[in-house]
Each structure stands twice: as structure tokens, then as C-alpha cells.
């Protein structure tokens, strides 16, 4: 099944029906499906990115390059939320046990993060896209938690450009934790040629619990950096 053409609209219902986010169907796409539907996913990205005038095309092409590169990675997985069309998506791949994902981390890596990485229980989420007409926070959390749970991961990981505080703030509002800064010289950026030199390292433990101030041992008290302003 593919997304139907046209812009996504929230499902309609009265006060006694589930919310629009609740009735969205989550579906995994394999590599072939992701490759086939990447133009539709790019359209969703542009609609969700709130790009400034003149930047939509450039942002769309950058998204397609990132997606094409990640599709080739071992263990790549992509999850979409849909009704009559795509309402959101999230994708990523398992973090390698040798810890290359954390290369350039400023200072000692939190012990719990190091241990989970070595045991193969960390999954990198490299893109999260949710349509602005949805309950963005709720849908993003639902997609991210489902993708991590599907891969039996204990910890999600992502890297955010330090110069993009709005993106960082969005992840923090979804329950992620800022554990520090990753610095990578331009000639050693193995992830993508366009990766910035400085990135915020964020993690999402699946056992956070309902309290926003509840942190697993070894993460919160070792956060030595401040959120970008």
C-alpha cells in the first residue's frame, strides 16, 4: 500500500472518537519501498520544514541526499504514519558496537551510553518528520518509540547541528536528553560530507517514564553542556 495522492488532512471525528494521532496507522517500509516512495517523503519534509521562501527546493534536495545515503546503511529502517497520505516518518540504523557514532565526543562518554553501545542496544534516529497539522509532539514520540522498540533498542541516539537550536529544542520537548558536544574535523566526517563540525549529541532512553525530570543513571548528571541559545 502506498500513500494516496494529495495533502494529508487529519481524520475527522467527534469528541468521542480517538484523536487524529491515535488513528494514524504506523507502517514499516523496506529499502525498496523507501527508495520508491522517497519523492513522497521529500514532499512531506518540505511541507513540515517551514522553509523560508526560496529554500524549499534546496532543503528538499538535501533531504533526498540524506535519505538516499541512509538507505544504503546496514540495518536501515523507516517507519511512516499515514491515513490518506503520509503524516510523518522516522528512520535510522543501528549504532555500531565499536562506537564510531560517538567519534569526536567532547570529554568522556557517559558510562551507560558506552555500555549500551558496546552491547548493540543503541539505534540512531537520523530523521524525524511530522506534518505541522498533527499533534507534532505526540506523533514524533509515537514514531520514535515504536522504531526503537521494533529494534529492541534501549537507547536512541541522534546528532543535531549546534547552530539549529529550534531542532534541538524540539527533540528535548520529545523527551530526548542533551549529553554533550561532538566535534568532527571536516575531513573526518564519515556520516555525510555536509555534516557540521559541531553537533549536539542527544539520547532517548526508552525507560524514561512519565516524569520529564526522570533520568536513567549515568545520563543526566553527566551532562556537562548547556543547551544552545
Image (spheres, rainbow, N blue to C red):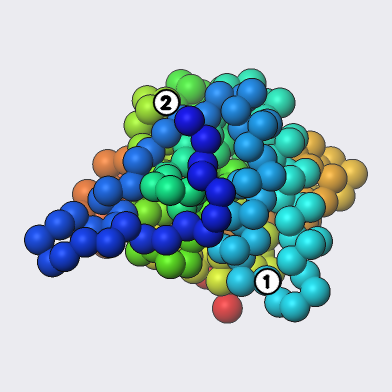
43 or 139: nearer the viewer = 43
- Please identify the quarter of the rendering in which residue 77 is found: top right
Residue occupying image coordinates x 55% and y 55%? 6
Precedes in sequence: disc 1 or disc 2 = 1
Which residue ends up furthest to the front in the rendered image?
A: 5
Residue 220 visible to an observer of this rendering: no
Quarter of the image holding residue 13?
A: bottom left
User: Which residue corresponds to the image point at 10% horizontal and 61% vertical from the top-left?
Assistant: 16
| Residue depth check, mark 1 versus mark 2: number of the one nearer the observer | 1
Residue 25 makes an appearance in the image: yes
State the separation of the CA atoms marked 1 and 2.
Answer: 32 Å
Give the secondary structure at mark 1: loop
Q: For the view shown, which residue lies furthest in the right direction?
A: 187
Q: How many marks?
A: 2
Q: Quadrant of residue 166?
A: bottom right
- Give percent across and percent down for residue 14: 16, 65
- Say if 26 sits above or below 50 in the image: above
Quadrant placement of the C terminus: bottom right
**To which residue does mark 2 refer?**
151
Q: In x, y percent, where is residue 54?
A: 80, 74
The structure residue drawn at horizontal position 86% and vertical position 50%, both measured from the top left corner, is 186
The front one of 201 and 150 is 150
Q: Residue at x 52, y 35 (%)?
A: 2
Numbered label attached to residue 132: none
State the SS at label 2.
loop
For residue 114, above or below residue 214: above
Q: Quick one: label 2, few (<14), some, or many (20+) residues within 10 Å?
A: some
**Label 1 belongs to which residue?**
51
- Give the x, y percent position of residue 122: 48, 32
- The image position of residue 23, as x and y in percent, is 27, 48
Amino acid at each position: 500500500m502506498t500513500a494516496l495522492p494529495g495533502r494529508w488532512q487529519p481524520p475527522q471525528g467527534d469528541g468521542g472518537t480517538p484523536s487524529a494521532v491515535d488513528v494514524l496507522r504506523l507502517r514499516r517500509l523496506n529499502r525498496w519501498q523507501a527508495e520508491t516512495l522517497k519523492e513522497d517523503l521529500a514532499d512531506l519534509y518540505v511541507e513540515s520544514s517551514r522553509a523560508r521562501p526560496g529554500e524549499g527546493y534546496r532543503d528538499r534536495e538535501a533531504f533526498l541526499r540524506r535519505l538516499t545515503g541512509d538507505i544504503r546503511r546496514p540495518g536501515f529502517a523507516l517507519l511512516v504514519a499515514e491515513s490518506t497520505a503520509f503524516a510523518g516518518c522516522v528512520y535510522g540504523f543501528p549504532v555500531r558496537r565499536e562506537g564510531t557514532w560517538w567519534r569526536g565526543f567532547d570529554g568522556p562518554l557517559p558510562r551507560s551510553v558506552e555500555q549500551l553501545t558496546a552491547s548493540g542496544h543503541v539505534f540512531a534516529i537520523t530523521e524525524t518528520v511530522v506534518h505541522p497539522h498533527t499533534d507534532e509532539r505526540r506523533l514524533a514520540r509515537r514514531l520514535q518509540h515504536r522504531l526503537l522498540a521494533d529494534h529492541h533498542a534501549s537507547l536512541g541516539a541522534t546528532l543535531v547541528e549546534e547552530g539549529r537550536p529550534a531542532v534541538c529544542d524540539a527533540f528535548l520537548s520529545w523527551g530526548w536528553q542533551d549529553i554533550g558536544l561532538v566535534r568532527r574535523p571536516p575531513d573526518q566526517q564519515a556520516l555525510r560530507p555536509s555534516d557540521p563540525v559541531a553537533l549536539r549529541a542527544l539520547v532517548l532512553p526508552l525507560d524514561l517514564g512519565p516524569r520529564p525530570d526522570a533520568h536513567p543513571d549515568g545520563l543526566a548528571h553527566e551532562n556537562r553542556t548547556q543547551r544552545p541559545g
